[in-house]
């Protein structure tokens, strides 16, 4: 049996956030959400993975705002997964939620049906910043939501924070971090705000003053330090957790685990194949109902490209990469790459420990630069064949 | 062979966009030289690049057969000429092969600088000028005003000038009639020793060089031994013939008055330079035709492959281009910053742009070019005088007794509204005002003397943008003048980048240095450390900018497992990185080199 993560995309929101470019629809139509649930279940059942060699060890409801979809629909989808797949007893089952779209009743119901992790979008504790981001909740509501989740017996709670917000200062960022820590949750994610084309924030970006790159870098380094102090260990560029609480589902994205994403614009990685579905709710639903093609684009990584994926993804984590895996599993000689890592280590951007190379927080900050350099080194690296393997090792 | 009385050799003189190629098309059509199915638009310009830019880069010739109303059939040899100042010498050689010229003037725009320059050139060569007013279909056409302009400014009668629309094909017949009536037939004794002028040549992989000639005296036929009087090269003629619209038409020979070609298994266009005289080895002419000169490069620039490994490809491409363009010169040079490349010499800026574009397009090369330079004349304190076309070789200020730079006489025609702007521009470019002449109520001709150095960057673009495209420019070299010049160096992280050095007038050095430093700051991506960008003269720093150290370059979120998107971004970044040049410890993208060439934007 092979482990599988399942991602369910819920493309509905109460309102659209100013920075969000994920596929989502602002809606209040119960009928639309119920129809969508029906389609997703059909997709789960008929998608071809049912009764396969997979067993599900993570299930993740992301969005959009899954909590906005209502307990009934979410439970129906979860049950459908249970019926169609072998699901492990301790399967990590996450719900993304906004603090103002949950109530105790909903949380209790979901916990009962198997949800055991909840991730709240908190973003900031500063009212001005929340307004600029187009968030519809306050920090008080976050506090209340976390308390409700505890009451509903959730013992694995995460909050998302954001830095690089218009007008954000070192003080407001520090306050947001302090407030998040005071919630005593198990997991905290900190994402740098990226102004994507096609968002409200992008259209109005000239009206705002954003902290510059240097300030954002300082915010990041401060967060890493502050969170470590509070017992949250960094395990990925943007993710921090108390011991034992890293997000198993998200970790699959980085350690090349397999996942199946269901819903419009959802991404999958199965059998070395990366693909995504039509990024439009109605078109996706019509196609699933009609049995038409729904794959938007796909690619299959082979040979040295897989080594590249390993490097770029695992270097996002504090676990890092190992020369042994690169040579044994991906058949690429590590020397050139290691030389490049050493160059960065000498400047404090990378480090070698426990047999693995990983980036330091300062290195994470410029990880695109480092990884693109490593990809150049990878191009120059010798490939290991049976003929030269013994010679190299000998 | 045709009777001389039935031959007319002529060219078309026009300002760019006034419809030269379109009229040529119509003449070809009218003479049934090409069927409409074969008719590609503007057949004379048969290089892609030419068609796109709407300019003729290389001269071409074509023979038309015109059955006139008088019952006679005339052989009309149309010799196409380049219209741009860069190719002045080629124009003059094409004119020397003709007895007449059609002068096309746009019925709306009237006479422009290039029209004037080329018309004067035609008159100097004793050509009969036949004015034609084109684009009469335009709503803004004012043929009467243009006729008056032609008479007042050029001083030739324009009463009978055909009023045509080449685009619509209106009154094309009139043009042909005027050519036959006004342009005299060629003279020359077919029995005299051979004298033929080379007005173009083209390399053909199968036949060797095809030499385009006009026979002035005597005749040429296959089997004859000929000598090029300037280069001294001798060949045995393999084939002669005439230039038909869709290809070469072999004939038994060509005699005095005719225009055509010969081949002689010639390997290199350098042996058949434009303007040279072809004569017979056994019975040579006493002296060559007048007017020959060696083509000289006016503008120089370093051309380097963006990817150092492509150096052999660049060399091959230049070798191939030179097969057809004897005016392109190049020799290997190397730069610390850019590695191995070539120092190339061009007739002018347009020529340079065309060559660069052809290298990139036809040979698929990614290039880095250095700032164009002219040839400076320097007298060293030790008494030695030398010509310097490369800033790298410019001596230290202390070793220079004096320096001179080439000047041009520029002739600008503009609507009166823009005179102020033009004067401002010329003044800014160190121009010396000579005089100004009103052509009529609305237009004026302005004469300036300008350093060539100041117009090779972006003068033409600046002129166009300051006059909404209305001004036209023509210039010619008038010699060297003493000047206060300095070499400006650019330092990145404390090291001089040789490829960015250039020579500039002292007064402009500060502004230039500042601007380049700013441009580099914008175009050099942040790196792991802070990079000072400095402009220096000798040991003096005149400008400084700083590229701050890179702190943040990260994708904070892997969007719900969308690895493909992230992979693409990193792939793009990787490819961009590979195209960068390492200058010491600093990585410089190609765009940075390009940006310093376009300071005005």
Image (cartoon, rainbow, N blue to C red):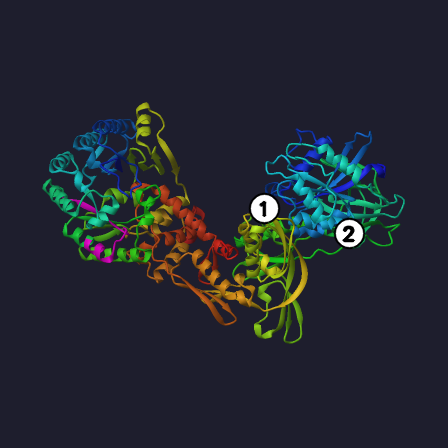
Q: Mark 1 and mark 2, same subunit?
A: yes
Region in magenta? A155-175
- Chain letter of disc 1 in the image: B
Q: Residue at x 62, y 38 (%)?
A: B141
Q: Could you tell me how far apart the alpha carbons at marks 1 and 2 are, in whole angstroms?
A: 31 Å
The single residue placed furthest to the top in the displayed view is A290
Residue A30 pos. (x, y %): 20, 29
Question: Which quarter shows the C terminus of chain A?
Answer: bottom left
In the current view of this chain or complex, which residue is farthest to the left?
A: A151
Q: Which mark is residue A28?
A: none
Residue density around tag 2, few if under 14, some if 14–19, many if 20 or more, within 10 Å: many
Q: Chain of mark 2?
A: B
Q: Pinpoint residue A102: horizontal percent, then vertical percent.
A: 15, 38
How many marks do you count on the picture?
2
Above or below residue B37? Residue A215 is below
Q: Residue at the location (59% across, 67% down)?
A: B394
Magenta stretch contains residue B438: no
Q: Nearer the viewer, mark 1 or mark 2?
A: 2
Look at the image and tell me whether residue A203 can be seen: yes
Label 2's element? loop
Among all residues in the image, which is located at the extreme right? B191
Q: Is residue B281 left or right of residue A261?
A: right
Q: Which residue is mark 1?
A: B363
Horizontal placement of A381 versus B87: left or right?
A: left
The residue singled out by tag 2 in the image is B276
Element carrying mark 1: loop
Residue placed at 39% from the left, 41% from the top?
Answer: A301
Q: Position of residue B233 (x, y in %)?
A: 79, 53
């Amino acid at each position: 049996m092979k482990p599988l993560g399942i991602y369910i995309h819920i493309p509905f929101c109460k309102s659209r956030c100013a920075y969000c470019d994920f596929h989502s629809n602002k809606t209040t139509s119960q009928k639309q959400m119920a129809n969508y649930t029906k389609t997703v279940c059909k997709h789960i059942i008929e998608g071809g993975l049912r009764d396969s060699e997979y067993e599900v060890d993570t299930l993740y409801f992301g969005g959009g705002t899954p909590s906005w979809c209502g307990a009934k629909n979410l439970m129906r989808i979860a049950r459908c997964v249970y019926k169609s797949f072998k699901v492990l007893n301790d399967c990590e089952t996450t719900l993304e939620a906004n603090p103002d779209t949950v109530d105790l009743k909903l949380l209790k119901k979901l916990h009962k049906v198997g949800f055991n992790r909840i991730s709240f979008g908190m973003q900031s504790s500063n009212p001005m910043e929340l307004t600029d981001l187009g968030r519809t909740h306050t920090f008080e509501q976050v506090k209340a939501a976390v308390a409700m989740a505890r009451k509903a017996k959730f013992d694995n709670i995460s909050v998302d924070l954001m830095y690089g917000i218009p007008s954000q200062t070192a003080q407001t960022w520090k306050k947001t971090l302090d407030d998040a820590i005071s919630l005593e949750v198990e997991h905290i994610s900190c994402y740098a705000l990226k102004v994507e084309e096609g968002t409200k924030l992008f259209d109005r970006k000239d009206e705002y003053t954003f902290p510059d790159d240097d300030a954002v870098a300082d915010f990041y380094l401060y967060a890493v330090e502050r969170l470590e102090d509070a017992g949250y260990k960094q395990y990925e560029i943007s993710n921090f957790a108390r011991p034992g609480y890293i997000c198993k589902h998200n970790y699959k994205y980085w350690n090349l685990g397999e996942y199946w994403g269901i819903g419009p614009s959802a991404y999958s990685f199965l059998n070395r194949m990366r693909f995504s579905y039509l990024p439009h709710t109605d078109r996706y639903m019509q196609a699933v109902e009609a049995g038409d093609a729904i794959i938007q684009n796909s690619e299959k990584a082979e040979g040295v490209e897989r080594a590249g994926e390993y490097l770029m993804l695992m270097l996002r984590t504090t676990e890092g990469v190992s020369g042994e895996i690169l040579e044994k599993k991906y058949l690429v000689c590590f020397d050139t790459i290691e030389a490049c890592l050493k160059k960065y280590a000498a400047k404090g951007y990378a480090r070698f420990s426990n047999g693995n190379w990983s980036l330091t927080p300062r290195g994470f900050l410029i990880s695109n630069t480092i990884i693109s350099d490593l990809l150049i080194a990878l191009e120059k690296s010798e490939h290991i064949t049976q003929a030269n393997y013994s010679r190299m090792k000998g | 062979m045709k009777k001389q009385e039935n031959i007319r050799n002529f060219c078309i003189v026009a300002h760019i966009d006034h419809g030269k190629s379109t009229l040529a098309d119509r003449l070809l059509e009218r003479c049934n030289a090409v069927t409409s199915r074969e008719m590609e638009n503007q057949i004379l310009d048969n290089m892609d690049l030419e068609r796109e830019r709407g300019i003729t880069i290389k001269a071409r010739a074509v023979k038309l057969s015109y059955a006139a109303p008088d019952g006679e059939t005339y052989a009309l040899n149309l010799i196409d000429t380049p219209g741009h100042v860069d190719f002045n010498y080629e124009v003059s050689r094409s004119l020397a092969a003709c007895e007449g010229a059609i002068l096309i003037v746009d019925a709306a725009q009237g006479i422009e600088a290039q029209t004037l320059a080329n018309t004067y050139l035609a008159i100097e060569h004793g050509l009969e000028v036949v004015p034609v007013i084109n684009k009469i279909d335009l709503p803004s056409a004012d043929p009467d005003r243009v006729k008056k302009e032609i008479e007042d400014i050029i001083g030739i009668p324009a009463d009978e000038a055909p009023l045509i629309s080449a685009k619509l094909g209106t009154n094309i017949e009139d043009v042909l009639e005027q050519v036959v009536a006004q342009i005299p037939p060629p003279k020359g004794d077919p029995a005299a020793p051979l004298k033929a002028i080379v007005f173009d040549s083209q390399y053909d992989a199968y036949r060797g060089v095809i030499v385009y000639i006009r026979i002035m005296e005597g005749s040429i036929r296959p089997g004859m031994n000929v000598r090029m009087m300037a280069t001294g090269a001798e060949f045995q003629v393999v084939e002669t013939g005439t230039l038909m619209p869709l290809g070469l038409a072999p004939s038994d020979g060509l005699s005095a008055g005719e225009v055509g070609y010969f081949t002689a298994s010639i390997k290199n266009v350098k042996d058949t330079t434009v303007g040279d005289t072809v004569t017979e080895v056994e019975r040579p002419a006493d002296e060559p035709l007048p007017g020959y000169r060696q083509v000289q490069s006016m503008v120089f620039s370093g051309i380097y492959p963006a990817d150092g490994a492509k150096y052999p490809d660049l060399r091959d491409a230049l070798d191939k281009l030179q097969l057809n363009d004897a005016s392109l010169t190049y020799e290997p040079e190397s730069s610390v910053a850019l590695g191995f490349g070539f120092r190339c010499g061009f007739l002018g800026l347009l020529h340079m742009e065309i060559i660069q574009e052809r290298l990139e397009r036809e040979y698929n090369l990614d290039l880095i070019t250095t700032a164009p330079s002219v040839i400076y004349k320097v007298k060293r304190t030790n008494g030695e005088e030398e010509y310097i076309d490369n800033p790298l070789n410019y001596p230290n200020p202390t070793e220079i007794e004096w320096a001179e730079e080439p000047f041009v006489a520029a002739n600008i025609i503009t609507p009166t509204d823009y005179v102020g702007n033009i004067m401002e521009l010329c003044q800014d470019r160190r121009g010396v005002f000579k005089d100004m002449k009103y052509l009529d109520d609305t237009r004026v001709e302005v004469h300036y003397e300008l350093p060539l150095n100041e117009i090779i960057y972006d003068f033409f673009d600046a002129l166009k943008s300051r006059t909404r495209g209305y001004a036209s420019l023509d210039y010619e070299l008038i010699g060297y003048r003493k000047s206060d010049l300095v070499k400006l160096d650019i330092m990145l992280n404390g090291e001089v980048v040789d490829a960015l050095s250039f020579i500039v007038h002292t007064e402009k050095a500060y502004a230039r240095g500042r601007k380049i430093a700013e441009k580099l700051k914008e175009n050099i991506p942040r790196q792991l450390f802070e990079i000072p960008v400095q402009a220096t003269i000798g040991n003096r720093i005149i400008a400084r900018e700083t590229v701050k150290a890179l702190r943040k370059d990260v994708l904070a979120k892997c969007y719900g497992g969308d690895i493909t998107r992230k992979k693409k971004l990193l792939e793009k970044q990787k490819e961009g990185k590979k195209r960068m040049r390492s200058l010491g410890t600093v990585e410089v993208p190609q765009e940075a080199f390009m940006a310093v060439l376009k300071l005005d934007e």
